[in-house]
Amino acid sequence: MLLWTLDAAVPALALVLALVIDRLWGEPPAPLHPVVWMGRALGACGARLAPARATGRDLWSFWLAALIWCALAAIVLFLAAALQWLAWAYLPAWGVALVLGLLLKPLLAWRMLRDEVLAVESALGQSLAAGRARLAWLVSRDVQRLDAAAVRESAIETLAENLCDSVVAPLFWFVLLGLPGAALYRFANTADAMWGYPGMRGGRYWQWAGKWAARADDVLSWLPARLTALLLWAAALGAVRWRDVRTQARVTPSPNGGWPMGAMALALGVRLSKPGVYVLNAAGRVVLAGDAERALRLAARAIAALVMLAVLGLESITHFK
Protein backbone atom coordinates (compact mmCIF):
# COMPACT_ATOMS: atom_id res chain seq x y z
CA MET A 1 0.00 0.00 0.00
CA LEU A 2 1.99 2.95 -1.31
CA LEU A 3 -0.80 5.51 -1.44
CA TRP A 4 -3.22 6.25 1.35
CA THR A 5 -6.62 4.73 0.76
CA LEU A 6 -8.17 4.90 4.25
CA ASP A 7 -9.03 7.60 6.75
CA ALA A 8 -6.50 10.46 6.66
CA ALA A 9 -6.61 10.64 10.46
CA VAL A 10 -4.38 7.55 10.76
CA PRO A 11 -1.33 8.80 8.76
CA ALA A 12 -1.85 12.31 10.13
CA LEU A 13 -1.73 10.98 13.68
CA ALA A 14 1.33 8.90 12.80
CA LEU A 15 3.11 12.00 11.49
CA VAL A 16 2.35 14.00 14.62
CA LEU A 17 3.31 11.06 16.82
CA ALA A 18 6.68 10.74 15.05
CA LEU A 19 7.45 14.39 15.79
CA VAL A 20 6.37 14.00 19.41
CA ILE A 21 8.60 10.94 19.85
CA ASP A 22 11.45 12.87 18.25
CA ARG A 23 10.91 15.78 20.63
CA LEU A 24 10.76 13.62 23.75
CA TRP A 25 13.36 10.95 23.07
CA GLY A 26 15.40 11.88 20.01
CA GLU A 27 17.24 9.22 18.08
CA PRO A 28 16.86 5.48 18.78
CA PRO A 29 20.00 3.47 19.68
CA ALA A 30 22.31 2.82 16.74
CA PRO A 31 21.65 -0.97 16.66
CA LEU A 32 17.93 -0.21 16.15
CA HIS A 33 18.30 2.75 13.78
CA PRO A 34 17.32 2.00 10.14
CA VAL A 35 19.39 4.91 8.81
CA VAL A 36 22.44 3.42 10.54
CA TRP A 37 21.67 0.13 8.79
CA MET A 38 21.43 1.97 5.46
CA GLY A 39 24.75 3.66 6.14
CA ARG A 40 26.47 0.37 6.94
CA ALA A 41 25.18 -1.25 3.76
CA LEU A 42 26.24 1.75 1.68
CA GLY A 43 29.64 1.84 3.37
CA ALA A 44 30.28 -1.86 2.73
CA CYS A 45 29.31 -1.53 -0.94
CA GLY A 46 31.04 1.81 -1.45
CA ALA A 47 34.39 0.45 -0.32
CA ARG A 48 34.32 -1.77 -3.41
CA LEU A 49 32.92 0.76 -5.86
CA ALA A 50 35.10 3.85 -6.05
CA PRO A 51 38.70 3.61 -7.28
CA ALA A 52 41.59 4.65 -5.06
CA ARG A 53 42.83 7.29 -7.50
CA ALA A 54 41.43 9.84 -9.91
CA THR A 55 40.36 8.42 -13.26
CA GLY A 56 38.94 9.71 -16.49
CA ARG A 57 35.46 8.85 -17.67
CA ASP A 58 34.67 5.79 -15.59
CA LEU A 59 31.36 4.44 -16.87
CA TRP A 60 31.98 1.07 -15.23
CA SER A 61 32.00 2.60 -11.75
CA PHE A 62 29.01 4.77 -12.63
CA TRP A 63 26.76 1.94 -13.79
CA LEU A 64 27.89 -0.48 -11.10
CA ALA A 65 27.12 2.11 -8.42
CA ALA A 66 23.75 2.84 -10.05
CA LEU A 67 22.89 -0.87 -10.06
CA ILE A 68 23.85 -1.32 -6.41
CA TRP A 69 21.96 1.87 -5.45
CA CYS A 70 18.83 0.55 -7.17
CA ALA A 71 19.17 -2.88 -5.53
CA LEU A 72 19.55 -1.39 -2.05
CA ALA A 73 16.70 1.06 -2.70
CA ALA A 74 14.47 -1.83 -3.77
CA ILE A 75 15.21 -3.63 -0.48
CA VAL A 76 14.39 -0.48 1.50
CA LEU A 77 11.15 0.00 -0.41
CA PHE A 78 10.11 -3.63 -0.02
CA LEU A 79 10.74 -3.71 3.73
CA ALA A 80 8.97 -0.40 4.35
CA ALA A 81 6.00 -1.40 2.19
CA ALA A 82 5.76 -4.79 3.90
CA LEU A 83 5.77 -3.24 7.38
CA GLN A 84 3.15 -0.70 6.38
CA TRP A 85 0.95 -3.38 4.79
CA LEU A 86 1.21 -5.61 7.85
CA ALA A 87 0.20 -2.74 10.10
CA TRP A 88 -2.86 -1.89 8.00
CA ALA A 89 -3.80 -5.56 7.62
CA TYR A 90 -3.63 -6.72 11.22
CA LEU A 91 -3.92 -3.75 13.55
CA PRO A 92 -6.77 -1.44 14.55
CA ALA A 93 -6.55 2.17 13.42
CA TRP A 94 -4.87 3.39 16.61
CA GLY A 95 -2.32 0.56 16.33
CA VAL A 96 -1.56 1.48 12.73
CA ALA A 97 -0.94 5.10 13.74
CA LEU A 98 1.30 4.02 16.61
CA VAL A 99 3.39 1.62 14.50
CA LEU A 100 3.73 4.03 11.58
CA GLY A 101 4.70 6.83 13.95
CA LEU A 102 7.38 4.66 15.56
CA LEU A 103 8.71 3.59 12.15
CA LEU A 104 8.61 7.11 10.72
CA LYS A 105 10.49 8.70 13.61
CA PRO A 106 13.98 7.36 12.72
CA LEU A 107 13.54 8.76 9.21
CA LEU A 108 13.44 12.34 10.51
CA ALA A 109 15.76 14.12 12.95
CA TRP A 110 14.57 17.53 14.08
CA ARG A 111 15.66 17.26 17.73
CA MET A 112 19.16 16.05 16.83
CA LEU A 113 19.58 18.88 14.31
CA ARG A 114 18.36 21.45 16.83
CA ASP A 115 20.63 20.10 19.59
CA GLU A 116 23.69 20.09 17.34
CA VAL A 117 23.19 23.71 16.26
CA LEU A 118 22.76 24.77 19.89
CA ALA A 119 25.87 22.76 20.82
CA VAL A 120 27.95 24.77 18.34
CA GLU A 121 26.75 28.03 19.89
CA SER A 122 27.38 26.71 23.39
CA ALA A 123 30.90 25.60 22.42
CA LEU A 124 31.64 29.04 20.96
CA GLY A 125 30.75 30.45 24.35
CA GLN A 126 33.70 28.51 25.74
CA SER A 127 36.24 29.29 23.02
CA LEU A 128 36.66 29.63 19.27
CA ALA A 129 38.59 26.35 19.16
CA ALA A 130 35.75 24.54 20.92
CA GLY A 131 33.22 26.03 18.49
CA ARG A 132 35.28 24.93 15.51
CA ALA A 133 35.64 21.42 16.92
CA ARG A 134 31.90 21.11 17.49
CA LEU A 135 31.10 22.45 14.03
CA ALA A 136 33.34 19.76 12.53
CA TRP A 137 30.70 17.24 13.66
CA LEU A 138 28.21 18.90 11.32
CA VAL A 139 30.12 19.93 8.19
CA SER A 140 32.71 18.41 5.89
CA ARG A 141 34.51 21.71 5.15
CA ASP A 142 37.79 22.72 6.78
CA VAL A 143 36.87 24.58 9.97
CA GLN A 144 40.33 25.50 11.24
CA ARG A 145 40.47 28.93 9.59
CA LEU A 146 36.92 30.00 10.43
CA ASP A 147 36.35 32.91 12.80
CA ALA A 148 33.40 32.97 15.22
CA ALA A 149 31.06 34.60 12.68
CA ALA A 150 31.94 32.02 10.04
CA VAL A 151 31.36 29.18 12.51
CA ARG A 152 27.90 30.56 13.24
CA GLU A 153 27.23 31.02 9.52
CA SER A 154 28.10 27.38 8.85
CA ALA A 155 25.86 26.18 11.68
CA ILE A 156 22.89 28.20 10.38
CA GLU A 157 23.49 27.02 6.81
CA THR A 158 23.53 23.44 8.07
CA LEU A 159 20.30 24.05 9.96
CA ALA A 160 18.57 25.46 6.87
CA GLU A 161 19.74 22.74 4.49
CA ASN A 162 19.06 19.90 6.90
CA LEU A 163 15.66 21.30 7.77
CA CYS A 164 14.83 20.09 4.28
CA ASP A 165 16.84 16.85 4.34
CA SER A 166 15.99 15.74 7.87
CA VAL A 167 12.44 16.99 8.38
CA VAL A 168 10.55 18.46 5.43
CA ALA A 169 11.55 15.96 2.74
CA PRO A 170 10.87 12.78 4.76
CA LEU A 171 7.46 14.11 5.80
CA PHE A 172 6.71 15.30 2.25
CA TRP A 173 7.34 11.83 0.84
CA PHE A 174 5.48 10.21 3.73
CA VAL A 175 2.39 12.24 2.85
CA LEU A 176 2.64 11.28 -0.84
CA LEU A 177 3.79 7.65 -0.66
CA GLY A 178 3.52 6.56 2.94
CA LEU A 179 6.33 4.91 4.87
CA PRO A 180 8.04 3.58 1.69
CA GLY A 181 8.31 7.14 0.36
CA ALA A 182 9.94 8.45 3.53
CA ALA A 183 12.29 5.45 3.70
CA LEU A 184 13.33 5.77 0.07
CA TYR A 185 14.09 9.46 0.53
CA ARG A 186 16.15 8.80 3.65
CA PHE A 187 18.10 6.12 1.81
CA ALA A 188 18.76 8.44 -1.14
CA ASN A 189 19.89 11.26 1.14
CA THR A 190 22.18 8.94 3.09
CA ALA A 191 23.65 7.57 -0.15
CA ASP A 192 24.34 11.11 -1.36
CA ALA A 193 26.06 11.95 1.94
CA MET A 194 28.29 8.88 1.65
CA TRP A 195 28.84 8.56 -2.10
CA GLY A 196 27.87 11.87 -3.72
CA TYR A 197 31.24 13.62 -3.79
CA PRO A 198 32.81 15.25 -6.88
CA GLY A 199 36.35 14.10 -6.07
CA MET A 200 38.47 12.36 -3.46
CA ARG A 201 37.05 11.46 -0.05
CA GLY A 202 38.15 8.81 2.40
CA GLY A 203 40.90 7.63 0.09
CA ARG A 204 38.43 6.96 -2.75
CA TYR A 205 37.62 8.85 -5.95
CA TRP A 206 33.86 9.41 -6.18
CA GLN A 207 33.54 11.56 -9.30
CA TRP A 208 31.82 8.78 -11.26
CA ALA A 209 30.90 6.21 -8.62
CA GLY A 210 28.92 8.81 -6.68
CA LYS A 211 27.22 10.56 -9.56
CA TRP A 212 24.02 8.46 -9.58
CA ALA A 213 23.52 8.86 -5.82
CA ALA A 214 24.03 12.62 -6.05
CA ARG A 215 21.57 13.03 -8.93
CA ALA A 216 18.95 10.79 -7.31
CA ASP A 217 19.07 12.90 -4.15
CA ASP A 218 18.80 16.08 -6.26
CA VAL A 219 15.63 14.74 -7.91
CA LEU A 220 13.97 13.59 -4.69
CA SER A 221 14.90 16.82 -2.89
CA TRP A 222 13.79 19.17 -5.68
CA LEU A 223 10.25 19.81 -4.48
CA PRO A 224 10.96 19.53 -0.72
CA ALA A 225 13.77 22.11 -0.97
CA ARG A 226 11.44 24.63 -2.54
CA LEU A 227 8.71 23.76 -0.05
CA THR A 228 11.19 24.37 2.79
CA ALA A 229 12.01 27.80 1.37
CA LEU A 230 8.30 28.56 1.06
CA LEU A 231 7.71 27.54 4.68
CA LEU A 232 10.60 29.72 5.90
CA TRP A 233 9.34 32.59 3.77
CA ALA A 234 5.87 32.21 5.34
CA ALA A 235 7.38 31.89 8.84
CA ALA A 236 9.17 35.22 8.30
CA LEU A 237 5.72 36.87 8.36
CA GLY A 238 6.18 39.17 5.41
CA ALA A 239 9.76 40.23 6.14
CA VAL A 240 11.05 38.57 2.95
CA ARG A 241 10.05 38.96 -0.69
CA TRP A 242 9.63 35.66 -2.54
CA ARG A 243 11.39 36.98 -5.63
CA ASP A 244 14.46 37.63 -3.45
CA VAL A 245 14.35 34.01 -2.27
CA ARG A 246 14.36 32.85 -5.89
CA THR A 247 17.31 35.11 -6.65
CA GLN A 248 19.36 33.78 -3.73
CA ALA A 249 18.53 30.17 -4.62
CA ARG A 250 20.46 30.55 -7.88
CA VAL A 251 23.65 31.66 -6.13
CA THR A 252 24.75 28.23 -4.89
CA PRO A 253 26.03 25.46 -7.20
CA SER A 254 23.52 23.05 -5.67
CA PRO A 255 20.14 22.95 -7.45
CA ASN A 256 18.40 22.62 -4.08
CA GLY A 257 20.56 23.85 -1.18
CA GLY A 258 20.27 27.51 -2.08
CA TRP A 259 16.51 27.55 -1.53
CA PRO A 260 16.33 26.91 2.22
CA MET A 261 19.68 28.60 2.91
CA GLY A 262 18.75 31.69 0.91
CA ALA A 263 15.36 31.93 2.59
CA MET A 264 16.97 31.60 6.01
CA ALA A 265 19.60 34.26 5.26
CA LEU A 266 16.96 36.73 4.10
CA ALA A 267 14.59 35.98 6.98
CA LEU A 268 17.34 36.60 9.53
CA GLY A 269 18.80 39.55 7.63
CA VAL A 270 22.28 38.01 7.76
CA ARG A 271 25.03 37.12 5.33
CA LEU A 272 25.72 33.40 4.86
CA SER A 273 28.65 32.17 2.81
CA LYS A 274 30.99 29.35 1.93
CA PRO A 275 34.41 30.87 1.14
CA GLY A 276 35.23 30.67 -2.53
CA VAL A 277 31.86 29.10 -3.41
CA TYR A 278 28.90 31.41 -2.69
CA VAL A 279 27.63 34.38 -0.68
CA LEU A 280 23.95 34.49 0.24
CA ASN A 281 22.30 37.84 1.05
CA ALA A 282 25.55 39.71 0.53
CA ALA A 283 23.97 42.92 1.82
CA GLY A 284 23.07 41.28 5.13
CA ARG A 285 24.86 41.87 8.40
CA VAL A 286 27.42 39.59 10.04
CA VAL A 287 25.99 36.68 12.02
CA LEU A 288 26.01 37.36 15.77
CA ALA A 289 25.47 35.41 18.96
CA GLY A 290 21.75 34.80 19.28
CA ASP A 291 21.13 34.36 15.55
CA ALA A 292 21.24 30.58 15.87
CA GLU A 293 18.39 30.70 18.38
CA ARG A 294 16.45 33.00 16.03
CA ALA A 295 17.05 30.57 13.18
CA LEU A 296 15.79 27.66 15.28
CA ARG A 297 12.62 29.55 16.21
CA LEU A 298 12.02 30.31 12.55
CA ALA A 299 12.57 26.64 11.65
CA ALA A 300 10.17 25.55 14.38
CA ARG A 301 7.45 27.81 12.96
CA ALA A 302 8.13 26.37 9.51
CA ILE A 303 7.70 22.83 10.86
CA ALA A 304 4.43 23.78 12.55
CA ALA A 305 3.16 25.12 9.22
CA LEU A 306 4.36 21.94 7.51
CA VAL A 307 2.35 19.77 9.90
CA MET A 308 -0.81 21.74 9.12
CA LEU A 309 -0.16 21.44 5.39
CA ALA A 310 0.53 17.71 5.73
CA VAL A 311 -2.76 17.09 7.54
CA LEU A 312 -4.63 19.06 4.88
CA GLY A 313 -2.76 17.19 2.16
CA LEU A 314 -3.64 13.80 3.63
CA GLU A 315 -7.29 14.78 3.87
CA SER A 316 -7.25 15.95 0.25
CA ILE A 317 -5.69 12.70 -0.94
CA THR A 318 -8.27 10.65 0.94
CA HIS A 319 -11.23 12.70 -0.33
CA PHE A 320 -9.89 12.54 -3.89
CA LYS A 321 -9.79 8.75 -3.70
Image (cartoon, grey):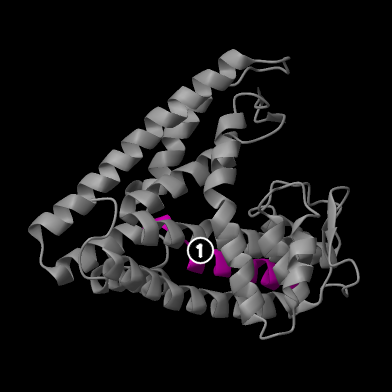
Q: Residue at x 78, y 47 (%)?
A: 142
Q: Is residue 291 magenta?
A: no
The answer to whether residue 301 is left or right of residue 42 is right
Instruction: Name the residue located 71 percent from the left edge and 69 percent from the top edge.
Output: 263
Taking the magenta stretch, the answer to whether it contains residue 111 is: yes
Question: Which residue appears farthest toward the right when viewing the image?
Answer: 283
Q: Is residue 67 visible?
A: yes
Q: Where residue 165 sits: x, y (%)?
A: 55, 56
The C terminus - image quarter: bottom left
Number of numbered discs: 1
- Residue 104 % position (x, y): 34, 59
Q: Residue furthest front?
A: 320
Question: What amino acid is labelled 1 in the image?
Answer: Val
Viewer-proximal residue among 275 and 229: 229
Our reading of the magenta stretch's main secondary structure is helix
Foreground: 231 or 46?
231
What is the quadrant of residue 120 in the picture? bottom right
Which of the 4 image quarters holds residue 132?
bottom right
Q: Answer above or below: position of 231 versus 80.
A: below
Q: Position of residue 96 (x, y in %)?
A: 19, 64
Q: Nearer the viewer, residue 167 or 137?
A: 167
Q: In the visual, does 164 lie left or right of 233? A: left
Q: Give left or right: position of 18 versus 163.
A: left
- At a point 32% along the width and 35% down the height, the residue shown is 75
Residue 28, relative to residue 123: is it above or below?
Answer: above
Q: Position of residue 123 (x, y in %)?
A: 70, 68
> Would residue 48 be seen by someone viewing this image from the given angle?
no
Region in magenta: 106-125
Q: Which residue lies under the disc numbered 1? A: 168
Local secondary structure at mark 1: helix
